[in-house]
Image (cartoon, rainbow, N blue to C red):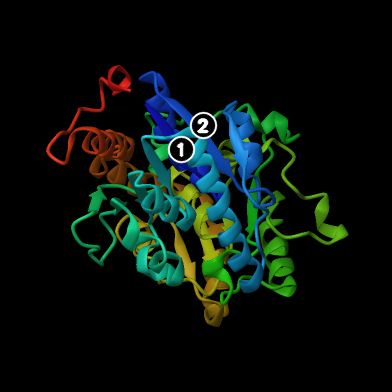
Amino acid sequence: MKVLIDAVHPADVWTLGAIEDRLLANGEETLWISRPEKDSVVELIEARGRPQVKGPKAGTSRTSLAYELVARDWRVWRTVRSFKPAVILTRSPAGVHIGRLTRTPVLYDTDDGHVAGLLYSIAGPFADIITTPTATEKTYGKPHRRYQGYKELFYLHPNRFEPDPGVRNELGLNPDERFSVLRLTGFTASHDTSEAGMNRQQIDRVIDRLSTIGRVLISSEQDLPPSLRELRIPSPVERFHHVLAAAELVVGDSQSVCSEAGVVGTPSLRFNTWAGRHPYQVELEERWGLTKAFHLDDEPKFYAELDRLLDDLPAAHARHAKGLARMLEWACDPVDDLTAWTYELAAQAMRGPDCVIAAEGGLSGLF
């Protein structure tokens, strides 16, 4: 069986890559469509050693994003015509559009859903299966499937991820040296064009506070000024989650990275205009205590919470560990669900809607 994987964000590579690993283990064939100049999408696929077709360069404004979508639709259409996949896995509109146009079954995963606005509206309604965490409040009709967990568990579940303390050597840290991570987002994605994160003054204030406990390392989608470039994380992008797991604290204006930190066991604070609007991140915060968000209008509260954490990091880590243990006991492994639903789509396409083949054995004998 051939599966086309459409990735436009680094988190897409991590999320859909976990499903790809299962498919490859079953003897299936995969091909990626990547997104040049979007953080590390191309580099992460290369690090996986997987074949890819490079899509158009990532847009950075409403006009360029609209142009990119049209160009990406065309690139995906050409790839589907030549590769002839049985199923398309995607977290972006282009894969959904071309799946509908070519009658190729599409599994569309989203943890943003309707919160992403236009991004969902031009994709979700055309997918054969829409998958979301159970935290998603809205129901998306008959194609909607929910998994009990979070996007981050696709690639950071203990079944697949074990923090490597050796990453400290890659960062040039002394044995007892502590460090924190500051993550800065570019806010160039289609759903981010009206949103905002920290300004330079706020970034400097955060760095000053974090410096009181040790070194500060920065991961940034933005071009950093010369005074901050030396703080960039030096390790390869595929080692980033090991960096998060080794940190004392993660602070930033990134949705995904702060949630990832929570899942690998590191307390995190988010400071942006998205605070309180993504259902799954609200659940991570309010149900498990694995991250905490503050709107830009709540600047005094953000700094007060940051100072509270820095004053007693051992207590913060102890609280976090308890919440993480409870969450992992509750959650299922979402890769099991999405792999099974991928095979279900392929089976329905070949034999009709009543045929479902279990994921464990694969469909290699049928294709």
- Quadrant in which residue 253 is drawn: bottom right
Tag 1: residue type? Leu
Please tell me whether mark 2 sits on a helix, a strand or a loop.
Answer: loop
Q: Quadrant of the N terminus?
A: top left
State whether residue 116 is above or below residue 220: below
Please tell me whether mark 1 sits on a helix, a strand or a loop.
Answer: strand
Specify the farthest residue to the right: 226
Q: Position of residue 167 (x, y in %)?
A: 64, 31
Residue in view at x 74 percent, y 74 percent: 201
Q: Which one is nearer the viewer's eye here, 137 or 36?
A: 36
Nearest to viewer (mark 2 / mark 1): 1
Query: Horizontal placement of 12 versus 319: left or right?
Result: right
Disc 1 crowd rating (10 Å Cα; few below 14, some 14-19, many 20+) is: many
Q: Position of residue 269 (x, y in %)?
A: 52, 61
Residue located beneath label 1 in the image: 4
Q: Position of residue 296 (x, y in %)?
A: 56, 77
- Identify the disc placed on residue 163: 2
Query: Horizontal placement of 39 versus 25: left or right?
Result: right
